[in-house]
Image: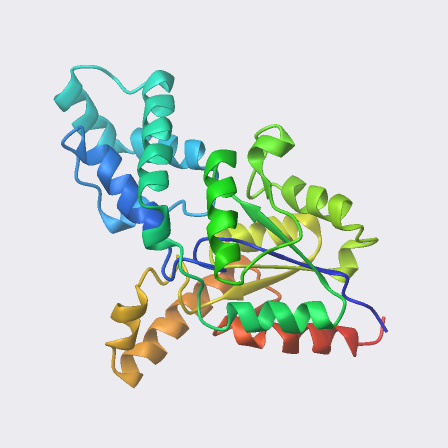
Amino acid sequence: MRKIEAVILDWAGTLVDYGCKATEENYRQIFAHYNIELTTKEIRAKMGIEKVDHIRAILESERVSKLWYKNTGMEPNEGDVRELNRAFDTYMLENLETYSAPKEYVRQTLETLRESGIKIGSTTSYSTDIMEHLTAFAATKGVYVDCWINSEQVKGQGRPNPYMIFKNMEKLGATSVRNVIKAGDTVNDIKEGLNAGVTSVGIIEGSSEMGLSQEEFDALSEKEKAAERKRVHDKFKQAGADYIINNFSSLPYIVAQLQNRKL
């Protein structure tokens, strides 16, 4: 029998911010300042990687780089990446509480996991400044973790690299990757877990991969909801997820299934 020692979670789209709307809207804002209207596809293509790398990838895409040159008269460079990243943090902090409501089932599920003696860790692509504000706000809603790690704590080597998970394990005292679960809402969350050798779980509803707000999802017909779930399920499956669940409430069942499995 194995004992699950830690569950490591993502933040936006997993614990809070149904549909991961904060990042999408803030990217729109910072590029709109340069008269560039980003498409949802351009924004969502690299979700889950570090924000500075994500901004760089958007800026280097063919359409956006051409528009940048047209609107600024210069090729995009690393100085532009850093400036956009600073602007992202500014917009995010200004709108933090608007987009940081805990997702359904999160508080209750975290309590259930803790009652089983499981430690709760987390990884994030947000900056330290944002995380200090986000964790403080989430705690007022009854959502908290035992530790959080961002790329600043692992020399910039964020997702899909495994190092934020390893740093969580170190802080939480987890003794083996076999005893750790990583759950998240993007393909890069899945890859992060796989690269670390832990059990990797994709969460469908409210995910960045689905990209719908709670109101948008609830407005769908049952047939449309099923189609959206299947679309995201197939994407997580293709990425190699060990388990895929509709929502956060199923996480304790994954824990139980793993703990009842013989080594």
Quadrant housing the C terminus: bottom right
Q: Position of residue 65 (x, y in %)?
A: 24, 27
Q: Nearer the viewer, residue 72 or 89?
A: 89
Q: Position of residue 167 (x, y in %)?
A: 70, 41
Q: Is residue 59 visible?
A: yes
Dividing the picture into quadrants, the one containing residue 58 is top left
Q: Position of residue 199 (x, y in %)?
A: 67, 61
Q: Residue furthest front?
A: 140
Whether residue 204 sits left or right of residue 108 in the image: it is left
Residue at horizontal 38%, vertical 23%? 82
Would you place residue 139 above or below residue 39 in this image? below
Dividing the picture into quadrants, the one containing residue 30 is top left
In this rendering, the count of numbered labels is 0
Q: Is residue 44 visible?
A: no
Q: Position of residue 18 (x, y in %)?
A: 38, 62
Q: Nearer the viewer, residue 182 or 191?
A: 182
Residue at horizontal 18%, vertical 30%? 33
